[in-house]
Structures are given as C-alpha cells and as structure tokens.
Amino acid sequence: MQNNLRVILAKKKLKMSDVVEGTGLSRNTVRALFYETAKGIQFHTLEVLCNFLDCEVGELFEIEKEAV
C-alpha cells in the first residue's frame, strides 16, 4: 500500500505541525503516517485527515499493483 501523505503535504506546502494543529491529531500519529511507520489507521483519523487535506481516501492511500 502506498502512503501519499508526504506527497500531498509537499504539494500543499504544509508541514507535519500544520496537520497536527489543524486536525487535533496527536503528533505521534501524524509522524507515524508521515514516515510510514504506522501499522494501521483508524477510520476517524482517515476522515479527519481527508477533511483537512481536502482529499479522498484513495488519494491518501493507494494499493500498489505488483508487476506480473
């Protein structure tokens, strides 16, 4: 699964701290998603991130198709 949080933040010229302040999510949660060390994500967190970033879940996370 491809996590595009870093790419979206770069395009919008936002920092992790902007996400933390704008969403109320914990710094640890945002950091884990940004550095792709998170093992999972709660639906509420997805909803909050997508609302803040004005994006869809499919833009934030994509399923990578393996080469055949």
Image (spheres, helix red, strand yellow):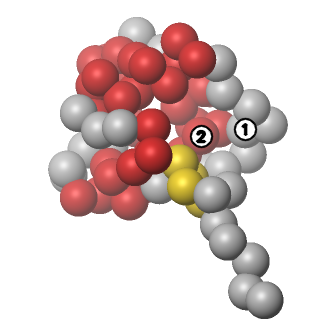
At mark 1, the secondary structure is loop
Q: Is residue 45 visible?
A: yes
- Going by the numbered disc 2, the residue's amino acid type is Leu
Q: Say above or below: 32 vs 19.
A: below
Rounded to the nearest whole Å, what is the CA distance between mark 1 and mark 2? 6 Å
Marks 1 & 2, CB-CB < 8 Å contact: yes
The percent position of residue 32, horizontal first and vertical second, equals 65, 38
* Mark 1 Cα-neighbour bin, 10 Å: few <14, some 14–19, many ≥20: few
In the image, what residue occupies the spot 40% across and 27% down? 49
Q: Say above or below: 16 vs 21.
A: below
In the image, what residue occupies the spot 66% across and 50% down? 36
Give residue 63's quadrant in the image: bottom right
Q: Is residue 67 left or right of residue 11?
A: right
- Going by the numbered disc 1, the residue's amino acid type is Ala
Q: Which residue is mark 2?
A: 33
The percent position of residue 60, horizontal first and vertical second, equals 45, 46
In the image, what residue occupies the spot 53% across and 31% down? 30
Q: Is residue 27 visible?
A: no
Q: Which residue is mark 1?
A: 38
The answer to which of marks 1 and 2 sits earlier in the sequence is 2
